[in-house]
Image (spheres, helix red, strand yellow):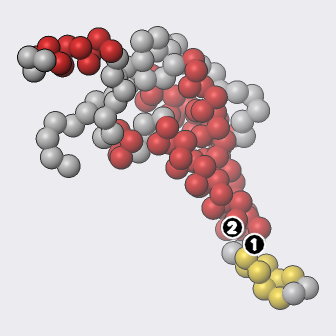
């Protein structure tokens, strides 16, 4: 990508005190919350309205980890009446990985999402236009 890289605009009302993880999150999901919430707060992009998205991201990430533990113990394949099949945890994990990836992008946690142009306010648009002599 050439040219100036866009930066995420800080939220106009960012959270300044570390929020506690919701009690319904699994142990693995709460660990992800404790890892990610401070990073988002440091970037000043975590607002009160983002906490549900953050909780869902952490839940999906926790599910990925939990399903991997199951797969490690029981294997990727199970034997059924109809023969060998993929362990149900494989599909659950794949779905959770997809959800985690999508939610990570929403929170600006992926390289691509951090390099997308940020949403600008009308005031910033007016300033840019006046700089160009428009």
Residue that numbered label 2 is attached to: 90
Quick one: quadrant of the C terminus?
top left
Residue appearing at x 10%, y 21% in the figure: 132
Which of the 4 quarters of the picture holds residue 45? top left
User: Residue 56, percent across and down?
Assistant: 64, 38
Is residue 31 something that shows in the picture? no
Among all residues in the image, which is located at the extreme left? 133
At x 50%, y 15%, the residue is 15
Label 1 neighbour load within 10 Å: few <14, some 14-19, many 20+: some
Answer few, some or many: residues within 10 Å of disc 2's Cα (few below 14, many 20 plus, some between 14 and 19): some
Q: Position of residue 58 (x, y in %)?
A: 61, 39
Report the disc number at residue 87: 1
Numbered tag placed on residue 69 in the rendering: none
Which residue sits at x=20%, y=49%?
1
| Picture quadrant of residue 26 | top right
Q: Secondary structure at mark 1?
A: loop
User: Whole-percent x and y of residue 82?
Assistant: 87, 87
Q: Is residue 43 above or below residue 93?
A: above
Q: Find the distance from the CA under tag 1 to the CA under tag 2.
A: 6 Å
Q: Position of residue 14 (x, y in %)?
A: 46, 15
> Which residue sits furthest right?
81
Pick the front one: 41 or 51 = 51
Q: Is mark 1 in CB contact (under 8 Å) with mark 2?
A: yes
Q: Is residue 31 left or right of residue 75?
A: left
The count of marks equals 2
């Amino acid at each position: 990508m050439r040219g100036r890289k866009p930066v995420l605009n800080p939220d106009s009302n960012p959270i300044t005190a570390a929020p506690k993880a919701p009690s319904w999150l699994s142990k693995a999901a709460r660990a992800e919350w404790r890892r990610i919430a401070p990073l988002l707060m440091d970037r000043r992009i975590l607002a009160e309205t983002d906490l549900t998205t953050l909780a869902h991201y952490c839940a999906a990430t926790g599910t990925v980890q939990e399903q991997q533990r199951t797969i490690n113990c029981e294997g990727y394949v199970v034997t059924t009446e109809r023969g060998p099949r993929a362990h149900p945890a494989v599909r659950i994990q794949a779905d959770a990985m997809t959800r985690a990836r999508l939610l990570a992008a929403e929170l600006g946690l992926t390289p691509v999402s951090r390099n997308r142009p940020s949403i600008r306010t009308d005031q910033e648009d007016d300033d840019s236009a006046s700089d160009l002599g428009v």
